[in-house]
Image (cartoon, helix red, strand yellow):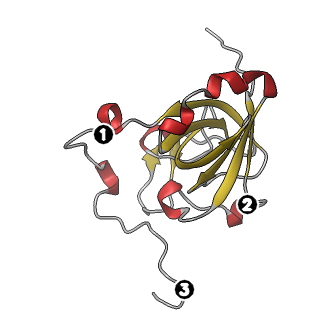
Amino acid sequence: MNFEISPIGTIHTPFKEKSQCPVQTGAAGEAVGSVELLPELAPGLKDIELFTHLYLFYIFDRAGEVELIRHPFLDDEPHGIFATRHPCRPTPLGLSIVELVERQGNVLTVKGIDVLDGTPLIDIKPYAPKFDGVEGASNGWLEGKDWRPKPEGRE
């Protein structure tokens, strides 16, 4: 079964190169970007301002070669692609949780963005702790891995 997915907008960020892009939303800190929906979809944003955070679904349009077994950035041990968040996937779908700063028409200003400038947006959903927080969830092989960037000048 095949599906055709068309972008509903574009994500704009300060990150022009992969090397500039934070690894995961939690490492993005205060990075601000904008999410520009197609103008005809703006009515679908009604009441989005009632949420503090959003899920952004997007396409890794500049990802590299797909490898089913990869060495992720946090581990020297290889893992299956579906046990990682690596962008080079059979279906290059990305997901980020961002803070909604404001809405102006069909443009959302967001904080904590971790994607490349010009990334095609395919969906937005509100983050709802009531539904999305999973008590007792496992971190899998990520348990105990220190992944957040250290402040400059510190090791």
> What residue is pinned by disc 1?
133
* Horizontal relation, residue 38 to residue 25: left or right: right
Using the image as rendered, state which of residue 22 and residue 30 is in the foreground.
Answer: 30
Q: Amino acid at mark 2?
A: Phe
Q: Which mark is residue 86?
A: none
The answer to whether the residues at label 1 and label 3 have Cβ atoms under 8 Å apart is no
Label 2 sits on a secondary structure element that is loop
Mark closest to the chain's N terminus, 1 or 3: 1
Residue 58 percent location from the top left of the image: 65, 36
- Residue at position x 70%, y 20% from top? 5
> What residue is pinned by disc 2?
15
Residue 54 percent location from the top left of the image: 52, 40
The residue at the far left in this view is 136
In the rendered image, which quarter is residue 11 located in?
top right
Label 3 sits on a secondary structure element that is loop
* Horizontal relation, residue 38 to residue 22: left or right: right
